[in-house]
Amino acid sequence: MHNHLEIVLTRDGSQTILDNTRETTYHSINGAVTESRHVFIEAGFKYLAAQGKSRLKILEIGFGTGLNAFLTYLETQKYHLDVEYLGIEANPLPDTMIEQLVYSEYLQAASTQNVFRHLHAASGLTEAHFSLKVLNDNVEDLTLPSGNDLIYYDAFGPRDQSELWTLELLSRIVGTMTPGGVLVTYCAQGQFKRNLKQLGCDVESLPGPPGKREMVRATLRKPNDA
Ligand SMILES: C[S@@+](CC[C@H](N)C(=O)[O-])C[C@H]1O[C@@H](n2cnc3c(N)ncnc32)[C@H](O)[C@@H]1O
């Protein structure tokens, strides 16, 4: 059932998954960990953490390997804040593949391999300052919980999966965000940015990770903002 998926190395030496049916990878071939850190951790998590928040509720669309969640977990060990993380993943990876993903070694955090494995456990993960659940369903079919401070939008791109980039779905996702909440994604498509603006977000085009000119950070305006 999953034999169209294989683990490949990206240019920074970290692993990603190649989906041979879609002919696309789960992360940039220019560096999986480099991209995840740049887009989700630096532009999203650290950006909000620097605002002095004590608690962050994070929603990830397209949980995949769990790399974004794992990097977020490692960051929460350095910051004094609590994270409640919900991942959405329509096609969870098989256990045999998860076992072969060695991000903890790559990140020189081998003692946390157990945490990485638990990110994928049906029961989720409850650690000090970090709790995680993953829902295995199509994001389009779910009622999404509200109160999200940070959205990691990491679906396949609009060319591969246009149904995940519609105004209608985006409207539901932005509708779950807290005022001042942030959505980050590697995608910088013009229509997507216009949709975010239409939904009441301030949209920043930031320098992208290696191989990509731009990425997007959208901040939901607070009611009193001009
Ligand atoms: C770009 S990859 C995500 C990479 C992931 N964040 C990671 O770090 O490995 C896109 C992910 O979205 C998932 N996906 C595809 N269609 C989906 C849907 N309708 N709802 C939720 N997830 C979906 C894919 O199975 C894949 O894992």
Image (tube, rainbow, N blue to C red):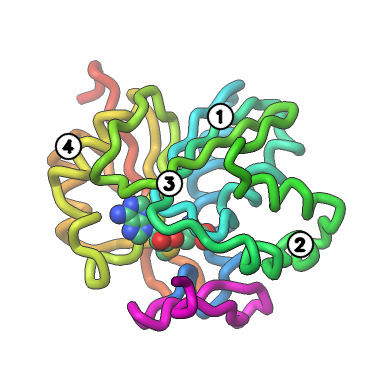
What amino acid type should be assigned to the residue bearing mark 4? Leu
N-terminal of the two: label 1 or label 4?
1
Q: Quadrant of the C terminus?
A: top left
Q: Is residue 11 rendered magenta in the image?
A: yes
Q: Residues within 10 Å of mark 3 (few under 14, many from 20)?
A: some
**Quarter of the rendered structure image containing ligand 1:** bottom left
- Per the rendering, the mark at residue 107 is 2
Q: Residue 201, how many percent across, how many down? A: 25, 37
Q: Nearer the viewer, residue 224 or 153?
A: 153
Q: Residues within 10 Å of mark 1 (few under 14, many from 20)?
A: some
Q: Residues under labels 3 and 2: Cα distance?
A: 27 Å
Residue at image position (56%, 60%) is 65
Q: Residue 112, how many percent across, how many down? A: 80, 50
Considering only vertical position in the picture, is 137 above or below 32? above
Asked where in the image residue 54 lies, by quadrant, the reply is top right
Residue at image position (22%, 36%) is 172
Q: Nearer the viewer, residue 123 or 154?
A: 123
* Residue identified by numbered label 1: 84
Q: Is mark 3 within 8 Å of ligand 1?
A: no
What amino acid type should be assigned to the residue bearing mark 2? Leu
Asked where in the image residue 102 lies, by quadrant, the reply is bottom right
Left or right of residue 210, residue 220 in this image? left
What amino acid type should be assigned to the residue bearing mark 1? Glu
Q: Residue 33, how many percent across, how many down? A: 61, 65
